[in-house]
Amino acid sequence: MKLRHNIGRTWLAAIFGFVLPLGVAHAQEIPTQLLKNTEVKQLRGIAVEPMTGPIRCDNAGNIYLQTYQYPDPLAAPVRRFTQEGKWLPELSLGQREEFKNKWYQIRDFQTGASGNTFVLVISSEKGKDGWAAGPSDVSVVEFDEDGKPDTVIKLDTAADFFAGQLEVFPDGKFLVGGFKVVRGPGYVPQNGVQAPREVYIGSYSQDSHLIAEFHPTPPPAKETAPETHDAERTAETSKQEKQNSAKESWSGKGFMPEDMVVGQDGNAYFFHKSAIPVIYVLSENGEFVRQFFVALPSPNARPWQIRSLPGLKLLVDFIEDVGEDSSAGQIDYFDMIDSQSSETISRYKLLPRDGGIIACYSEPYDFVFLGGDPQGFTTIVHASPK
């Protein structure tokens, strides 16, 4: 029993209704190296549980995640443990007055260089049904190394902003991504139809004030995307993609699980998962620097997440179902990309029988995954190219 079979890929999803033009440019064939398990270590004190968001690692290699909590999974604390299986104090919002008797969700979290953790939270008054009632606040909560919530910074966010991704720059500024509802002139609400929305990224100072905002727009038609195995997708295919994304959401309350990292160059890399994925590069002040497309590694691969690596590199993860759905497992592709030239340096492939869910990567070529064994215990799995 593998962890990926137990938890699936239960990240929240939604549809931005925003597709990039599908021009084609020649792309060099990238040799693919197969990853194989090199070590599997059982953590007897940590059972396999469904997860509801990203897995992060801090500088010490400790693992951070959220496990499913009924009835609102994203209200669960961030749990963390060492790669030897020792539990560390969990990061819970219940210790702060700001969130008592409130509805709240943890949308993202990032580990800091000194053992601290930053958590992105949305909160509002709680209705009679226990869910949100009224407008939501967006806050960043900083936890210290001992798991205590030191500070709560309520951000000066725009109206109708649904926050989903957090990055923290070394100087303390915050970059928050998500989407914003757009109701243009003449807009008429329709029952059962979501209002138009667009990707939105806000840059905030340490004292919560908005510095800049960025609204990604489709590039001009003359721009071309890199050649992919499915660059000729039709409008019907894009429609099917949207339907598939909707299947991954919970009761329509989720949003697209975009991903964002701060690179070694000090810029943020926002991974937008459109039909052909694009990465937007933003400065610490939220200013647009550039953008580049990322080629899909196979016809049925879907963009999943991005990591920052030493040496001005990015690691982009794609997933592909085996068969018609994920019941038979999923293949991972990992593309290592030069963040300055946007060129793919190398590509790795992980078959369902190996690995698990990506947790960390360290040089040279050591991929660390969370897996699960037949006894129901979590495993730490190391894999490298063979």
Image (spheres, rainbow, N blue to C red):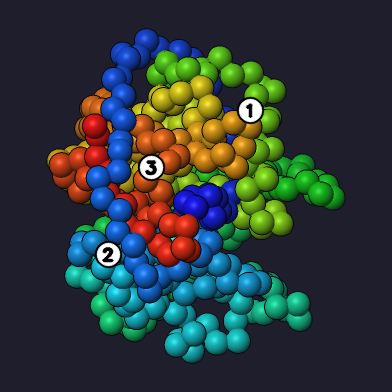
Residue 363 visible in the snapshot: yes
The local crowd at label 1, few if under 14, some if 14 to 19, many if 20 or more residues have their Cα within 10 Å, is: some
Q: Quadrant of the C terminus?
A: top left
Q: Which residue is mark 2?
A: 83
* Farthest right residue in view: 191
Q: Earlier in the sequence, mark 3 or mark 1?
A: 1
Q: Amino acid at mark 1?
A: Ser
Residue 159: image x %, image y %? Answer: 58, 60
The local crowd at label 2, few if under 14, some if 14 to 19, many if 20 or more residues have their Cα within 10 Å, is: some
Q: Nearer the viewer, mark 2 or mark 3?
A: 3
Q: Amino acid at mark 3?
A: Asp
Q: Residue at x 84, y 50 (%)?
A: 191
Q: Which residue is mark 1?
A: 238
Residue 66: image x %, image y %? Answer: 47, 66
Residue 39: image x %, image y %? Answer: 26, 50
> In the shown orientation, is residue 297 left or right of residue 328?
left
Q: Are marks 2 and 3 in contact (CB under 8 Å)?
A: no
Q: Residue at x 67, y 44 (%)?
A: 246
Q: Which residue is mark 3?
A: 354
Q: Please determine whether, in this image, residue 222 is positioned above or below residue 218.
A: above
